Structures are given as C-alpha cells and as structure tokens.
Amino acid sequence: LIESLNTEILPETFVKKYQFLLGKKASIKLALELGYSNGCLEGMNNKIKAIKRVAYGFRTFRNFKKRILLMNKTVTN
C-alpha cells in the first residue's frame, strides 16, 4: 500500500520524508514487533540532568552520586 503511493502529486517535502521512512521500513517494523524501548533509560537520564541543573554543582561527586541513587531508590545506606 505505501510503496504504491503516487509521489508525483505530492509536495517535495512530503516526498523526501516519505523516502526517508521507506528507507527505515525494516527498523520501524522491528520496533513495532519486538516492543523493546529505551524510554525508561531516557527518563532516568532526564532526571539526572534535572538534578544537575537544580543543584548548581555538588561539593563532591560522591554527594551527586548519592542523590542519583536516592532518586532511583537503589541506596541502602
């Protein structure tokens, strides 16, 4: 269905995006079939960056690391 689309009547910007998506067809298909996502990791990275912005620098890296571990509830002591 998608491959049979007539691109002659479409704007050039749409055709470029269409060709890009056709090139990524296998990757998109795998992403939909497998269901794996790096969303959790991206969220964690975002939280770490937010801590870094709000803190204006920790006195030591150890304190920064403790704050990250507390945020992720992985600190025991």
Image (cartoon, rainbow, N blue to C red):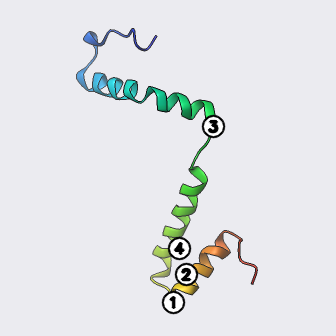
Q: Check the image and report above or below for 39 versus 18.
A: below
Which residue of the protein is positioned furthest toward the right in this rendering? Answer: 76
Q: Nearer the viewer, mark 2 or mark 4?
A: 2
Q: Nearer the viewer, mark 3 or mark 2?
A: 3
Answer with mark 1 or mark 3, whichever residue precedes in sequence.
3
* Dot 3 alpha-carbon crowd within 10 angstroms: few under 14, some 14 to 19, many 20 or more: few
Disc 4 marks a residue whose amino acid type is Ile
Q: Dot 2 surroundings within 10 Å: few (below 14), some, or many (20 or more)?
A: some
Residue 26 placement (x, y as % from top left): 47, 28
Residue at x 58%, y 31% (from the top left corner): 32
Mark 4 or mark 3: which comes first in sequence?
Answer: 3
Badge 4 local density, few (<14 within 10 Å), some, or many (20+)? some
- Amino acid type at image mark 1: Thr
Q: Earlier in the sequence, mark 1 or mark 4?
A: 4
- Determine whether, in the image, residue 63 is placed left or right of residue 57: right
Q: CA distance from mark 4 to mark 3?
A: 30 Å
Residues at circles 2 and 4 in contact by the CB criterion of under 8 Å: yes
Q: Position of residue 58 (x, y in %)?
A: 50, 86
Question: Any mark on residue 64, and which?
Answer: 2
Q: Amino acid at mark 3?
A: Gly
The residue to which callout 1 is attached is 60
Residue identified by numbered label 4: 51
**Cβ atoms under marks 1 and 2 closer than 8 Å:** yes
- Secondary structure type for disc 1: loop
